[in-house]
Amino acid sequence: MNDWRDIAKTEIHLHLEGAAPPDFIRQLASEKKIDMTGVFDADGNYQWVDFVDFLKTYERACEVLKTPEDFKRLVEAVLAESASHGVVYTELFLAPDFCGGGDLIAWKEYLAAMSEGAVAAKNASGIEARFIATCVRHMGADQAKITSKVAAETASGLLTGWGMGGDEAFGNAADFSYAFEQAAESGLGITSHAGEVCGPDSVRETLDSLPVSRIGHGVRAIDDPELVRMIVEKNIVLEVNPGSNISLSLFKDLKLHPISALRDAGVKITVSTDDPPYFHTDMTAEYTNLHQELGWEISDFNAINQTAMQAAFCDEITRSKILKKFEGA
Ligand SMILES: [Zn+2]
């Protein structure tokens, strides 16, 4: 197959604001008369030179996102973009801290608006979406407790997961156990970023102290064979984002990326894009690169999509409906 755009795909690691199409941000900025000088390069893409600069650009772009209506439009735009790359099921990370600052009533308005955006997108393209509310690690454990409380109290409908992003080096995973237990008790599926910027110890610590069934990234586990065995034994699924890792120079290229070694060791892996327009990637590019550089074929992609759906934070009817798309071959 030469064109990987049209084949069905799933994605389970995608940050809503980080997936904002540049055109969408430019449009909203012009409506609100917000100056975006320096955010985009001559070709209209997000511009940044290193990780600190990436965060700066990300924050500047997010400045245009204020009201529930803005977020509704963003969900619609992001899901339309995903669907155009063949994505049939996706999970979006949302940050309640930036949608009402932890206030339950405000969050409910944002969540309702974003849910409307997801319904509109589903009506337009058929794409199924679920939301994962995330705390921001470097905002600390106390703020995470507040955030997980609003997530737990609104755990229904499309909000089906809880996770943690932000600076992996901040504090210890165990500091966040209260927030995670509170979310888990409400029935939300649980994941956390670890083993991206920080080494295998960050993954081990997360597995030891938080009730996760999935790890965001986790690729640095490859440096610790015993940890890799533990991930296999505990049946933990890794949300791997190869294009993101290469863009941030964690690994030089796909041949040096541990996705194959982890898979060969028996780890359950999946493929997502993280913050696609920032990392100059999309799901079509991920599949094309895996095919061209690692020789992955449709059977390999069906296998990772089955893994993603088995680990997806969704109801059983949706799970079996989507799984059917990845049977055979
Ligand atoms: Zn991420």
Image (tube, rainbow, N blue to C red):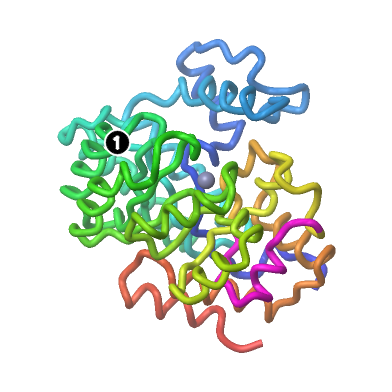
Q: Position of residue 251 (x, y in %)?
A: 75, 48
Amino acid tagged 1? Ala
Q: Is residue 176 left or right of residue 308?
A: left
> Is residue 181 in sight in this rendering?
yes
Residue for point 59% across, 48% down: 199
Q: Is residue 281 left or right of residue 238?
A: right
Q: Position of residue 25 (x, y in %)?
A: 54, 28
Q: Position of residue 279 (x, y in %)?
A: 67, 40
Residue lying farthest to the bottom in this orientation: 328
Q: Nearer the viewer, residue 12 or 23?
A: 12
Question: Where does the C terminus fall, quadrant-wise?
Answer: bottom right
- Read off the magenta span: 256-271
Asked if the stretch drawn in magenta spans residue 263, the answer is yes
> Is residue 84 in sight in this rendering?
no
Residue for point 64% across, 36% down: 278
Q: Which residue is mark 1?
A: 141
Q: Is residue 133 left or right of residue 327?
A: left
Residue for point 20% across, 41% down: 150
Residue for point 62% across, 54% down: 220
* Residue at disc 1, secondary structure: helix
